[in-house]
Image: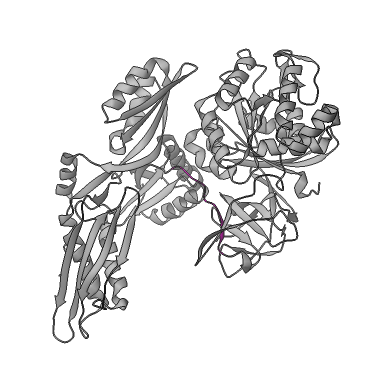
Amino acid sequence: MSYSTPQIRNVALAGHPGAGKTTLFEALLHAGGTLQAAGTIERGTTVSDHDPIEKARGHSIDTAIASTDHLAASGERIHLNLIDTPGYPEFRGPALSALSAVETALIVVDADTGVAHGTRRLMERARQRNLCRAIVVNKIDHDGADCARVLADLRESFGAEVLPLNLPAEGGRRVVDCFGQAQGDSDLGPVAEWHQKIIDQVVEINETVMEHFLDAGEGGLSGPELHDAFEQCLREGHLVPVCFVSARTGAGVAELLDVAERLFPHPGEGNPPPFQRTNGAGTEAVQARPDPQAHVIADVFKIVNDPFVGKLGIFRVYQGTVKKDALLFVDDGKKAFKVAHLFKLKGKDHAEIEQAVPGDIAAVPKIEDLHFDAVLHDSHDEDHIHLAPVDFPRPMFGLAIEAASKGQEQKLSTALQKLAEEDPAFVVEHAAELNETVVRGLSDLHLRVMLDRLKDRHGVEVRTRPPRIAYRETIAAKADGHHRHKKQTGGAGQFGEVSLRIEPLPRGQGFEFVDEVKGGTIPGQFMPAVEKGVRQVLASGAVAGYPLQDLRVVILDGKHHPVDSKEVAFVAAGKKAFLDAIGKARPQVLEPVVDLEVAAPEAQVGDITGGLSSKRARINGTDTVRGEIIVRAQVPLSELEGYAAELKSVTAGRGRYSLDFSHYEPVHGNVQQKLVDAYKPKPEDD
């Protein structure tokens, strides 16, 4: 099928673990005709979970993309790009990336368990990204399903704008429409009441539609008129539609495809993407237009290092048409690459295509310069353009790793780089002073999966140990510092003198360097050398060997010599003056504090909260959802070493937890003294 932008629907399936997203993904591809038969998780035959680790674990750990062409009941055709996202919070890095490529987030809810904490989190994320939100209640045919309760919980959790477009009937064996018709019965009673609520909600968004409705009734509304009003409701969050389905039996799946054609926005209708251009004057907004004739603007939202195809960059086209054999630039690169192959994806399989129009999702292979969030374009007019960055959670779980076998260090480094390219929430750090490589992720499970991939996909086994905690240093008071660097070894010498002041900044403000030298006492060409010396201390620390942050350095005065002043002299003077000031400014060691969320059986709440209290935790609140307790707390990261094993023991393996970075705060005085005593700075040449 050839298709244009108005026929495209981009939809991400998101939801709590176990809600049935992957099964629904299969069912939609089957109903659309892409699959002859839907695969199953139990047999390991799904398009989505094709990774061996996913098959072994029985759940998604990465996003999967596939498309289907659907002929709706209206006679209109659509091209539906579907992205299946992982439900576990440990793997929300790829899931959040996917949300940047779609207009609609389809939040899948289990009819057995109802609204889970993950449901609330995903609904909020979609709202923050200005996405149209729709809810699918899955598993309506299960014995434990309580669709009336789930619908009531959805409306209580997310507001009266949550309204069903269809309702289950005959115990979930089929669904009945309550948007397009006002007659009929369902398992939740007559559809007329819900039909009227939907119409009332939709027509009030638009004055013209409201006037037509009041003058001529519902029959006076044209199809396009109602679509436009409905799309506006979705885009502005005025309506959050609910569709009931059983992905296992197919009940409601074809109807969901019809809803996508009839009511979901196409790429020309959704909220415009927040592109920005950065230049010397600052940052300005850029409006990408879904015009197939315009210059190309596309964003890479996923990288896959395929063992057969090589690096695969998966992108969303926002403007222009990407054609096979075209020349494209990556970011601000000066050398274009040729689009030798252009693919549509179906899980791990690729189908060659000739072009990708505005709004479409496609992939290019074997372009090494590609990276997550790279912008592809065909004109230097689009240099310095990028999408507003996704707010990814900061990975706080860490493991220090090294190759288990000698001679595999380079292979390990290359493999880690490839894994980090694929997951924006997986970070690789190398501490040169410790010769320590640390990988960081969102949980213990996240890192275990990544280490499994290292072994299975790249053939590298590693040894692990707990890393050093990422402490930081700062100051608590203003202070002045001074140093004169003078060296004479025969012939030309070295001379530089610096006076400076340091002062604390609010937590999280980083570092500022200010030049207030008057009268040229430090010539301008030496000021970068002074800053270099200061930054050397910032990186290496002053009292305990940890990077410094949240302070301002103001260079006040200095002296130079017309012959002996050199860059190296002012580097040393700046560094020693900075150290002199820090010693007087009440230096502090800061420790990272994380937002911890623990989910466990309700019966274990006392064990959970008691254990956290012993770790200097501040309990911020608890929720109870269907026999499960959710505990939210703030805890120093240093207290959580071994917590995964502890939680597993307390809850018999039924507990789980996730972390997000919160802030840094000063450590206790005795802890700081131990860290200071253990620090052995390298001797400096004077």
- x%, y% of residue 310? 58, 54
Q: What is the quadrant of residue 523 in the picture?
A: bottom left
Q: Is residue 105 left or right of residue 633?
A: right
Q: Magenta span: helix, strand or loop, mainly? A: loop
Occupied quadrant, residue 188: top right
Residue 386 is a magenta residue = yes
Residue 418 drawn above or below residue 69: below
Quarter of the image for residue 503 reads: bottom left
- In depth, the one of 541 and 91 nearer the eye is 541
**Relative depth, front residue between 322 and 37:** 322
Give the color scheme: rainbow, by chain, secondary structure or one colour: one colour
User: Is-magenta flag for residue 542?
Assistant: no
For residue 563, side relative to residue 243 (left or right)? left
| For residue 300, side relative to residue 76 (left or right) | left
Residue 176: give x, y in percent of width and height.
Answer: 76, 20
Residue sitting at x 70%, y 35%: 205
Let me know if residue 291 appears in the view: yes
Q: Which residues are magenta?
A: 384-393
| Rendered residue at 80%/30% (across/down) | 213
Q: Quadrant of the C terminus?
A: bottom left
Q: Residue at x 37, y 51 (%)?
A: 429
The location of residue 678, given as percent across then percent down, is: 16, 48
Q: How many marks can you see?
A: 0
Q: In this view of the protein, can residue 32 be seen by the observer?
A: no
Toward the viewer: 310 or 543? 543
Q: Position of residue 164 (x, y in %)?
A: 69, 24
